Amino acid sequence: MPVETGERRRHLRWRLRKRLTGRISSDHKIAILDISLGGALIEHANPVRSGTVSFLTVSVAGQEVTLKCRVIRSANYRYEVRPTGVREHVYRTAVEFSAPSPDLRHLLHEITDSDQMERQGDVFRKTG
């Protein structure tokens, strides 16, 4: 059942302070900023095209979880300067999961079953 958050979201989301890392499209490294049964917000260095179907792969609790998703939107969010002095784009991308699969439920269980969770309004935040 959707939780009223004052937003258009249909699912309760978990915002992660300690970001989970993984890959999208098998070779682009990503960090997950927040996640829900419906989708996730990720950050990465390589552009991805809106509308494309992809796979988001994350390692959690020693297991690799792969989730089918569709890129909803992606935009250059900021720049980072690497130690070499090279300025690099950082993109933020919203992805929508095709269905609440057992792998997604496992991933959310691992995130929420932590003693580092604290609830802040209708958003959960992982501390640590």
Image (spheres, rainbow, N blue to C red):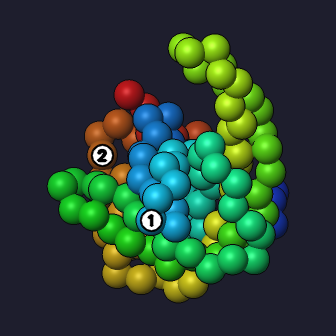
Q: Which residue is mark 1?
A: 26
Q: Quadrant of residue 112?
A: bottom left
Q: Which mark is in front, 1 or 2?
A: 1
Q: Amino acid at mark 2?
A: Ser
Front residue (pair 1, 27):
27
| Distance CA(mark 1)–CA(mark 2) | 28 Å
How many residues crowd mark 1 within 10 Å: few (<14), some (14–19), many (20+)? few
Instruction: Say which element carries label 2.
Output: loop
Residue found at x 75% / y 77%: 51
Instruction: Give the x, y percent position of residue 113.
Output: 30, 53
Compared to residue 19, the image places residue 60 above or below, namely below
Place of residue 76 in the rendered image (x, y in percent of width and height, measured from the top left): 79, 44
Q: Residue at x 18, y 55 (%)?
A: 62
**Which amino acid, by three-letter code, is at mark 1?**
Ser
Identity of the residue drawn at 30% across and 46% down: 114
Residue 46 visible in the displayed image: yes
> In the image, is 104 to the left or to the right of 36?
left
Relative to 67, is 103 on the left or the right? left
Residue 58's disc is none
Q: Nearer the viewer, residue 75 or 97?
A: 75
Residue lying at the far left of the rendered structure: 62
Q: Which residue is mark 2?
A: 114
- Quadrant for residue 128, please give it: top left
Q: Quadrant of the N terminus?
A: bottom right
